[in-house]
Image (spheres, rainbow, N blue to C red):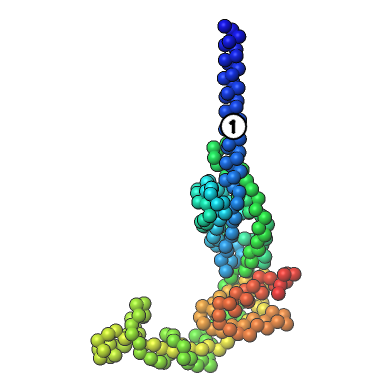
Amino acid sequence: MGFAAINTANNLIYLIVSALLSFMGLSGFLGRRNIQDLEVILETPEESYDSIPFVSVVRLINKKRFMPSFLIRCNILNYKVFFPFIDNNTSTVAYTEMRFKGRGKHKIDRIYVCSVFPFNFFVRCKSLSQPLEVLIFPAPLVCDSGYFDISEEKQHRGEVNSDKPGFDSDMISIRNYIPGDPFKLINWKATAKTGNLKTKELSSLLYEPVIIDLKDIPFDLEKKLSCAVFMINSLYKQGIPFGLRIDDKLFPPECSQSHKIRLLRELALYGSQNQR
């Protein structure tokens, strides 16, 4: 009777250990499979400035044909983004606030994908080698030296009317009212004649171009660069053509988003080996 009880206990222990090992094996298989065939894409904004927070998009792609993934945490530098669930053959996005200290290129060599799935026993992680560079512009700094003073009188010196629609000068046409048009631009005479709201379309003004010369800004290097960034952003918002002179390089005045980004890039990389 004693031997039978011992055998029964041994069999019970064997069954428990076997079940536990099977359970752990299943957990390991599901956990490893859960973080396989995943891709992470980090999308940063076109304009990111030194020490100023910005929002980035983290896109998680599940390339598995049949199995979804659960409880995925992406570690990007010191930033963590959580995805509760992503179905197979799909992608999803999350958002995270990021901030980089110092202008220039910042490298992200690896992104880690981690999960506690399926039973919250272990944290399994996988390293994704996805080299990425984030270009950080100098932080805009309000210039208080008197070098940058675009007063109303200076803005209008040499101005001419353009044939592009705007809100500044002479009337170039009368058109149907569009929701959002300023109330002051409604042409009441034409409205009374036609019975429909009519809006005056005015020409915009072309301002005298401004060339920012880095050597003429009376500050140390980093403050010069930040001041130039402030000038570029201000001129762009006002629609004034702007150019930039850096040492022996001259960028002729334009007023476009692509031109602004090009100049900000030059300022961000100034003095580095990566400057182009």
The outermost residue toward the top is 1
Residue 10 locus on image (x, y percent): 60, 17
Residue situated furthest right in the rendering: 273
| Residue that label 1 marks | 22
- Give the structural element (helix, strand or loop) at label 1: helix
Instruction: Please name the residue shown 59% across and 32% down the image.
Output: 22
Which quarter of the figure is the N terminus placed in?
A: top right
Give whichever of 20, 170 is nearer the camera. Answer: 20
Residue shown at the point (57%, 69%) measured from the top left: 46
190 up-or-down from 97: above or below: below
Q: In this orientation, which residue lies closer to the viewer: 77 or 39?
A: 39
**Where residue 87 appears, x then y in whole percent?**
50, 51
- Residue 81 visible in rendering: no
The image position of residue 273, as x and y in percent, is 75, 69
Viewer-side residue, 43 vs 238: 43
Figure quadrant of the C terminus: bottom right
